[in-house]
């Protein structure tokens, strides 16, 4: 007979506590701030799932989003979208990325890296209870962490 989980929980306080700890540690959601480019979505999702064991990746996109972090008005828009992921979904990790061959932001890799570093600093200045990582999606569609 299948016993519903909550019934076990009621009769086993230790198990109930373990479940609560599990819920806190599960890190089910993280947040990806990326370009809208269709070529980078799956590489980002696979990388994050594998590296951080996260189930769902909330995604905020704009074309050439790493460039947009120089636009104050747009930053507020991105911030309000990201805060839904952090406050409601409990995301503990934000990935901000730029990528090779970006149509929305056709600058050199060097320029992208500078923009991603700036964007990472901006997101950190929001003081959300999260870890912020900048990444570069290279010409082989692989992710490289950018140290800030
Ligand atoms: Zn792009």
Image (cartoon, rainbow, N blue to C red):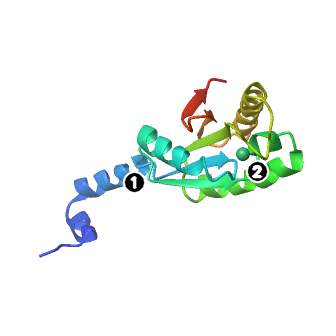
Residue 93 higher or lower than 74, as above or below: above
Residue 25: x percent and y percent? Answer: 41, 46
Which residue is depicted at the point 87% across and 44% down?
A: 71
Relative depth, front residue between 8 and 59: 59
Residue 42 higher or lower than 108, as above or below: below
Q: Which residue is mark 1?
A: 23
Which residue is depicted at the point 58% across and 50% down?
A: 41
| Mark 2 element type | loop
The local crowd at label 2, few if under 14, some if 14 to 19, many if 20 or more residues have their Cα within 10 Å, is some
Give whichever of discs 2 and 1 has the lower sequence position: 1
Spatial distance from mark 2 to mark 1, Cα to Cα? 34 Å
Quarter-of-image position of residue 134 = top right
Relative depth, front residue between 104 and 81: 104
Relative depth, front residue between 138 and 19: 138
- Evaluate whether residue 90 shows in this view: yes
Q: Quadrant of the N terminus?
A: bottom left
The local crowd at label 1, few if under 14, some if 14 to 19, many if 20 or more residues have their Cα within 10 Å, is few
Q: Is residue 105 left or right of residue 51?
A: right
Q: Is mark 2 within 8 Å of ligand 1?
A: yes
- Evaluate whether residue 129 shows in this view: no
Which residue is depicted at the point 81% across and 40% down?
A: 67
Disc marking residue 63: 2
Disc marking residue 114: none
| Mark 1 element type | helix
Asked whether the beta carbons under mark 2 and mark 1 sit within 8 Å of each other, the answer is: no
Q: Is residue 133 left or right of residue 115?
A: left
């Amino acid at each position: 007979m299948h016993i519903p989980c909550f019934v076990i929980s009621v009769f086993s306080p230790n198990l109930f506590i373990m479940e609560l700890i599990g819920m806190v540690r599960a890190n089910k959601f993280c947040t990806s701030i990326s370009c809208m480019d269709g070529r980078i979505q799956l590489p980002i999702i696979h990388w994050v799932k594998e590296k951080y064991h996260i189930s769902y990746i909330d995604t905020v996109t704009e074309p050439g989003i790493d460039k947009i972090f120089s636009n104050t008005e747009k930053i507020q828009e991105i911030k309000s979208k990201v805060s839904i992921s952090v406050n409601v979904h409990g995301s503990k990790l934000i990935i901000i990325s730029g990528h090779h061959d970006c149509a929305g932001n056709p600058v050199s890799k060097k320029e992208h890296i500078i923009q991603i570093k700036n964007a990472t600093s901006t997101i950190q200045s929001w003081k959300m209870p999260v870890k912020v990582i900048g990444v570069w999606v290279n010409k082989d569609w692989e992710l490289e962490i950018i140290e800030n």
